[in-house]
Amino acid sequence: MSRRNIELSDGPFQHKRSSLCTGRSRTNSLTSPTRHVHYGTMDDSPPVGTPMPNTSFYHRAHRLVPSHGRQRTVSASSIDVYEDPVTGMDRVASNSSMHTYQRGHRASEPIIDTQPLIRQQSSPAKETISSKFESLDYEVCENELYRKEEFKESYQVGLWRISRNRWIACFFIGIFTALVASAIDILVTISKQIKFDYILKGLILSCDHNLEMGESANCMWTVELVWIIYNCALVGIAAFLVIWISPIAGGSGIPQIKCYLNGVAIPDVVKLKTLIAKAIGVSCAVGGGLCAGKEGPMIHSGGCVAAGISQGRSTTLGLDFGFFKEFRNDRDKRDFVAAGAAAGVSAAFGAPIGGVLFALEEGASFWNQNLTWRLFFTSMISSFTVSSVLAWWYGKAGWLSWTGLANFGVFENKNYNIFEIPFFLAIGVIGGVSGAAFNALNVRIAKFRIKYVHTKRQRFMEALIVAAMSGFFGFLTIFMVDDCQPVGVNPNNTEVMQMWCKKGEYSAVANLFFHNPEEGVKSLFHAPINSFRPWTLLIFATEYFFLTAWTFGVSVPSGIFIPMLLTGAAWGRFIGISLSKIVPGVTGIDPGKYALAGAAAQLGGSVRMTISLTAIIMEATKDITFGLPIMLVLMTTKFVGDLFNEGVYDSLIDMQGIPVLGWHPPKMSRNINAQQVMRKDVVAFERRERVGRIKEVLEVTSHHGFPVVDRIEESMTGPLPDYGVLQGVILRSQLMRILERRAFSIHPDGRTGSAYHLTHEDFVDDTDCKTKSMADLGLTSGEDLMSWVDLSPVLHPHPHRVPLNASLPFIYKLFRGLGLRYLMVVNDENRLRGVITRKDVARYRDHRSKNRYRLRELLISEDN
């Protein structure tokens, strides 16, 4: 019995299962008794003695007829009213009353398996691979037309022009990513000025005046109410943009970009409307006082900018500027999105090296040296552009040493002793545990949302509730925790933060809750030792931990980098102050250093980044002195956190069922071979096919590629056809282009008398072919359907293939390293026996339980 109980829509070659298994009714032209029928021969009449249909699923009512001097089954290439045009098998009548039961029954019935190491996922509702996510076409199609381009005189000039345009595109990606980052920072600054200079300061002065006049002192609750209303207004704008304009713009966007760079096509992930909703939404979310950062969404914004510039057009606006047409393919687009992600990190933290390492560590699954250099160039351009724009905005035009969106300041005390290393390692352990706890809590909240928060109105109300509660808990903590400090203790604070404190004092709690998160992190790093009481830091870290876990996942653009840094810096500074009191005679213990270590530990424990996060923090603080303790903290944090669960981004990806391939193949999988992984129910073509069959196959399948073999014959041992020698692969978009250009002929060779001769330029930009339907092509006449197509010039003649005994780790490395979308499986005679897609590989997961690894096989669900 097959392990997969439902269809693989991403499988570019497998036919759709019958309606009995999938619950889909085949209501298409196949069941129409009035349509034209042909039988794969040169005449229009059916073979003599064609039998009537039989109700048996496996019964074959076909006869062999001569075709071009060889025997060929009618089912191989005909469009018979009694056959499924994909496989030639008799159709099974739809039974809509049974499809729900069949699906559930298949999911729950026991699986007979000879591999004891594989544990079948018993409940597809718990963890499945979604069939709605497609793969990117990263592989170059080296067909006959592609090779002919090399003989043209203009080919050499074209190579130079493409190389030049790559650098030009990267330059503009860096510029525009920086402009988006600057716009976000300026919008947040304007919101801050409105809240503090007009609302908070004005209302506090009004309260002071009322107190002097002897009136009621309850006006501070008026301050809280106005504050909450203002926050809810901004958060409402952010939620509206996400819920009703661009749902993919919610969250940080890093999981989506990570999946895209891994080779998974996420719908609308890099569209212009996504960029607009992301940039405006994150400005409103941060300005609205949520426990959110603007740095994470900058990575997504950079990817959107890169996709738009590299394609030279906007599908959202329907505008085509006509440049960079040579990059309108998945392969180049994915590389430019990687450059945009790196530029986003660089703009956010002023960390160009960290941006490149982030794209390498967290994003791309396949890499090349030239791409690394272009990413570094893009990151540098982005970093210095942000510095120029923000320096001009803050009145320091020409200053190029601005530190991106997150300015953490420079440490004056850069000394640390060897006896402090164990303390840093202990902070790493705490960060690993707290990061794992955060991930577990956030996943539970996300599952609760999936189960109970369904409608758009519910999601919108949740965002408003989170905004209101964030402001309420901030004011409540200020009222409950008495931590008033003289204004002169921390020179960065003024009487605006007075709140319930006496005149000339400020509230340390308000300094943490009501400042922008970046300013809070900077204050914890560099404020004097007596700026915060220890219990204030511990209470704030606890509250902010839970508020961040609640906020991350709300339907607004929000990042997790700065909130995690702020949380970790709070409890890290608490540890530093505690150590200074426990061992007062030891010099060199600076709470700011421990705040830095705690910030790195908390963020690393959640996202499980190591090398890139080390580089980002060192560049953001402009000091390599703390490189060793930060590296040790992050290594310890990742080791401890991995004992409990995955990183927060990986957990969210798994919840969505996205078929992402990690760095390493699943353990205990060497005894799983290609014959067990592959799909046998393949849809294939021969080199010369009727237009009618191509049309019907494209109509009844959603696959994106089809193998081409020398012959298709009826199998004597099973219901599926017996395919011949593999000769290549052809994509759905290529078939659509052939039919659109009407590159077919009534002559059997498919070329003689063709109305159009294909060239390589016809397939450079295939984006429009991915959105067109068969109805748009207008192939309705009988002459068109009877015409022949020669697929030889277009098909990819040497697709990657493996033998039947290839191991799963070997197959996994091929997909991961080469960015494959599909892999052919052949026998010793090179005859096609099956196809492996990304989902077939991604559904195998290892699981550690009681110090033993086991291999799980997930189901592939069309309901995600």
Image (cartoon, grey):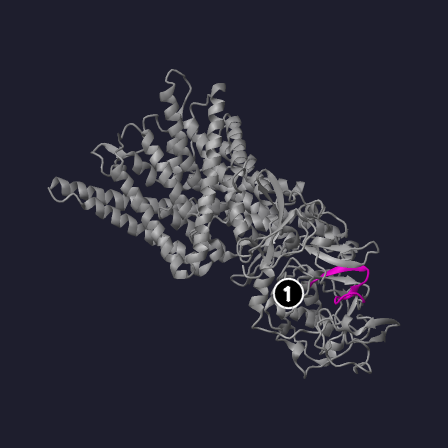
Q: Quadrant of residue 746?
A: bottom right
Is residue 484 at least partly visible in the picture? Answer: yes
Question: Which structural element holds mark 1?
Answer: loop
| Along the line of sight, the residue nearer the viewer: 10 or 519 | 10
Q: Seen from this angle, which residue lies furthest right?
A: 69
**Is residue 746 positioned above or below 299 on the image?**
below
Is residue 152 at least partly visible in the picture? Answer: no
The location of residue 864, given as percent across then percent down, is: 54, 59
Range of the magenta residues? 716-731
The location of residue 550, given as percent across then percent down, is: 40, 47
The location of residue 721, given as percent across then percent down, is: 77, 66
Which residue shows up at 50% across the image and 30% down it? 633
- Horizontal placement of 589 versus 69: left or right? left
**Is residue 439 positioned above or below 688 on the image?**
above
Q: Is residue 722 magenta?
A: yes
Classed neighbour count for the residue bearing mark 1: other residues with Cα under 10 Å, few (<14), some (14–19), many (≥20)? some
- Horizontal placement of 501 versus 78: left or right? left
Of the 4 image quadrants, the one containing the N terminus is: bottom right
- Horizontal placement of 480 versus 411: left or right? left
Amino acid type, callout 1: Ser
The location of residue 310, given as percent across then percent down, is: 59, 52
| Along the line of sight, the residue nearer the viewer: 359 or 309 | 359
For label 1, the residue is 702
